[in-house]
Amino acid sequence: MTFKLVRFIIRIVMKLIARIEVRNAENIPSGNFIMASNHLGRLDSAVLLYIFDREDIIMPVAEKYKNHPIFGVIGRAANAVWLNRFDTDFHALREMLKRMKEGGMLVIAPEGTRSKTGALQPGKAGVSYLAAKSGYPVLPVALTGTEDRYVVEQLKHFRRIHITATAGKLMTLEMPQGKNREQILADQTEEIMCQIAALLPKDYHGVYADNPRLKELMENA
């Protein structure tokens, strides 16, 4: 299947089963950028394809879905970058940077895997590395309503799912130099995760709930 056809089908299905609310849409740029969001459930990618009317999406997808009857089809249609989510996948990182040089929008979940509780898990430094290396700005996006348990429960009772996608403000990162490079990348990732957390209800804050930077962002909101 072609990407256009897959996206068309996804949009029809999502309109039937969900009410998707996009908040702060004015913050979403039209050029090259990285969309970094929390990862709640299997519908996250479908929400992305529903919201963004673009064909230059660069989408990393967990390798385990490569042969999945649904997500494998979506991944292949979107020319996904198949990713080993448990180890640092340098091949996938190089492929993403290669595609980013050609232009487009990279979508990534810094946590690397779905949250079983819905609350934020620690972000991985790959997102800050890709942003700093490519020069792409980062757009923090917070999702709610795509948790697998909630989705199944709603559909089981023939109720529409209420999904929100809230866009934050663009962030620009610089590639750190010197001995503290890894720590700086980790700090940049923490900033991205706190920016995402600040857009979410408190129940979603997870490991960042007591982070001083998040508290600062919430106070200044």
Image: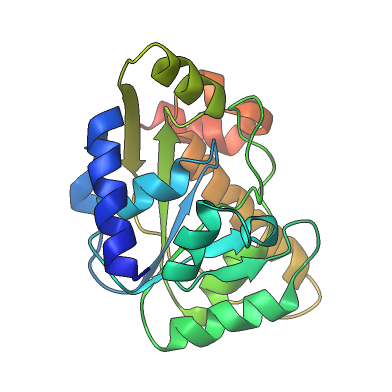
| Residue shown at 25% from the left, 47% from the top | 11
* Residue in the foreground of this view, choosing between 74 and 54: 74
Residue 80 position within the rendered picture, expressed as x and y whole percent measured from the top left: 52, 69
Q: Quadrant of the N terminus?
A: bottom left
Model colouring = rainbow
Q: Is residue 168 visible?
A: no
Question: In the image, 197: left or right of 14?
Answer: right
* Residue located farthest toward the top when viewing the structure as drawn: 157
Q: Is residue 115 visible?
A: yes
The part of the image, by quadrant, that contains residue 181 is bottom right
Q: How many marks?
A: 0
Q: Quadrant of the C terminus?
A: top left
Using the image, determine if residue 195 lies above or below residue 71. Answer: above
| Residue shown at 30% from the left, 29% from the top | 17
Question: In the image, 159: left or right of 151?
Answer: left
| Residue shown at 50% from the left, 80% from the top | 134
* Residue located farthest toward the left when viewing the structure as drawn: 26
| Residue shown at 34% from the left, 24% from the top | 161
Residue 131 position within the rendered picture, expressed as x and y whole percent measured from the top left: 52, 71
Residue 200 position within the rendered picture, expressed as x and y whole percent measured from the top left: 44, 29
Residue 112 position within the rendered picture, expressed as x and y whole percent measured from the top left: 66, 51
Using the image, determine if residue 167 lies above or below residue 154. Answer: below
* Residue in the foreground of this view, choosing between 164 and 76: 76
* Residue in the foreground of this view, choosing between 191 and 21: 21
Using the image, determine if residue 76 lies above or below residue 111. Answer: below
* Residue in the foreground of this view, choosing between 212 and 6: 6
Using the image, determine if residue 111 lies above or below residue 185. Answer: above
The part of the image, by quadrant, that contains residue 187 is bottom right
